[in-house]
Image: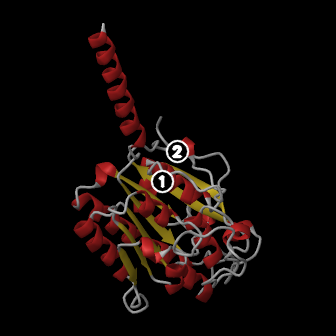
Amino acid sequence: MKKNILFILLGIFFAMNTYNISAASPRAKHVILIGLDGWGAYSVSKAEMPNVKKLMDDGSYTLKKRSVLPSSSAVNWASMFMGAGPELHGYTEWYSKTPELPSREVNKNGIFPTVFSLLHESDPKVEIGCIYEWETIRCLVDTFALNYDKHVSEAESNPAAAAQYAADYIKKAHPNLLAVIIDNPDHVGHAAGHDTPEYYAMLKELDKYVGQIVNAVKEAGMLDETIFIVTADHGGINKGHGGKTMEEMETAFIISGKNIKKGHEITESMMQFDVASTIAHIFKLEQPQVWIGRPVLSAFEK
């Protein structure tokens, strides 16, 4: 009788542990986040972007993700990384390097919790990188959580540099989470205007960089365990942004890869801060209470 009870208890123990391991398994081991500054959703149908559109066809997407107000850079990159809006994280302007409002909560590094810091805290052994052309990005990611923190200072003279750094890093380090933030087509939008031939020429060029990063993931043998996200901080109109038109407010969100539905249009509402929550969901991270983002669950296979 005692032996039977012991076997039953052991069976329950192993079953519970097997379930916990399974429940804790991420939906993918790697996430590559590609951010294109100033890429308005209005441009997608007209743009020559075969690599981006293949990710759309092979994955899920919405062209109605909304920026937070104002529709400017730092406040939206912060919201994308921090899972909350400016009212909570405190970064309120286009060039915010520190919060203008006191952050409602800060982590041990003194910054509002980011998806980078959440992943690092969950397992300090994970590999996390961020490659960016606009230096202000480093103020918004929590660099203490990064293994690789690369500001591409030569981007103006060598526009292909960020994608090359990303490809090299992917093949060398196999990062679990990598953000590649490119400071275009925003520059062209300010110089020549949004929805102009010059703007679409830049999108065609940026698409090549997306393809280069995808190919690096393939060459690294990571493809079957990777989820790609391609999105933007805001759009634009004429030669600016920061206002309340839908050309400025609506951006694309494309997610493709392991456990992602193919050819699926996301119909539920999505906000900028939902990007962080979606990445946290992929890695099975528990959101801080101060986050208000929601993962886009409809994009995932059951």
The front one of 108 and 18 is: 108
Residue 46 picture location, percent across and down? 55, 64
Residue at the spot of label 1: 255
Residue type indicated by callout 2: Ala
Residue 179 picture location, percent across and down? 43, 69
Q: Quadrant of the N terminus?
A: top left
Tell me the distance, in whole angstroms, between the alpha carbons under discs 1 and 2. 8 Å
Q: Secondary structure at mark 2?
A: helix
**Whether residue 234 is visible:** no
For image coordinates 29% across by 72% down, the residue present is 169
Residue type indicated by callout 1: Ile
Q: Quadrant of residue 119?
A: bottom left
Residue 219 picture location, percent across and down? 22, 61
Residue at the spot of label 2: 299
Q: Quadrant of residue 149?
A: bottom left
Q: Is residue 84 left or right of residue 275?
A: right
